[in-house]
Image (cartoon, rainbow, N blue to C red):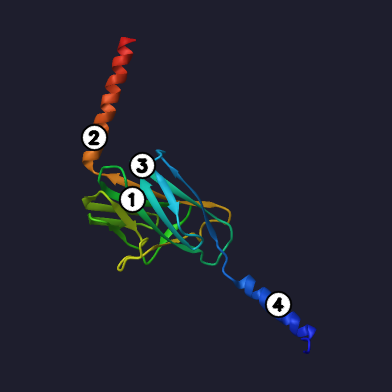
Amino acid sequence: MKSLPKSLLGGIALAIAGAFAAAPAVAVEYTGASFANPSPSNSVLSFGAGAAQSFDVNFGVLTRVTLAFVTFRDEPLPSMSFNALVNNLTGFNFDGLTVQLTGGAVFQTPYGTVTPTFGTISGIGITPTLVTTNLSAGEGYALNFGNPLGQPGQSDWTIDFSNVQSGSTFGVTIAAVPEPETWGLMLAGLGLMGAMVRRRASKA
């Protein structure tokens, strides 16, 4: 069997190297989640990577969570698809959902969908950095931000981070809005705690 000429071998090696160099690199990485009100019943599970990020967000207490991402390579038009299954474990109904981008990232058109499990949407407001969804019927189970379950008629959101410098972070903050009745219960509880504190102070 004849050996291949060195010039041909060199050309093959260059072609292989060029193919690897041209291969799309992962330009963003999920680095973790932080809850405004930490609780053992709050959790985030990540199922995606790179240009396709998917999350299960479990709210056991009423709070908000920020998902942090870091970019580590400049791309001509860096973007990623994003979805989240927002699970309601609080015992109260969610009256709405807000999803906000920080750090220079923006939502790219066409926009995705927001779908409650049993509730109904009364209105949705979208800006490049904020999505606000209001529910006419409270949601006690879960909401799909995007299409985490692969359902027909639902679509993921695209996050454009071309204005985020390489090595910098951007965040996605998800907050569930409780029903007015929930706020009333919370305020009543805070008022009761305040009365107890004042009573103890007066005794002292």
Element under label 4?
helix
Disc 3 residue type? Thr
Image height check: is 184 above or below 201?
below
* Residue 22 position in % (x across, y down): 61, 72
Q: Which quadrant does the N terminus fall into?
A: bottom right
* Mark-to-mark CA distance, 1 and 4: 50 Å
Q: Which residue is mark 3?
A: 63
* Residue 51 position in % (x across, y down): 49, 63
Label 2 crowd (10 A; few <14 / some 14-19 / many >=20): few
Q: Which quadrant does the C terminus fall into?
A: top left
Q: Which residue is mark 4?
A: 14
Which callout, 3 or 1, points to the residue nearer the camera?
A: 1
* Mark-to-mark CA distance, 1 and 2: 21 Å
- First in residue order: circle 4 vs circle 2: 4
Label 1 crowd (10 A; few <14 / some 14-19 / many >=20): many
Disc 1 residue type? Asn
Q: Quadrant of residue 152?
A: bottom left
Q: Which residue is mark 2?
A: 185
Q: Which residue is mark 1?
A: 87
Q: Residue at x 59, y 71 (%)?
A: 23
- First in residue order: circle 3 vs circle 1: 3
Disc 2 residue type? Leu
Label 4 crowd (10 A; few <14 / some 14-19 / many >=20): few
Element under label 1?
strand
Q: Residue at x 72, y 81 (%)?
A: 11
Front one among 111 and 188: 188
Which callout, 1 or 4, points to the residue nearer the camera?
A: 1
Label 3 crowd (10 A; few <14 / some 14-19 / many >=20): some
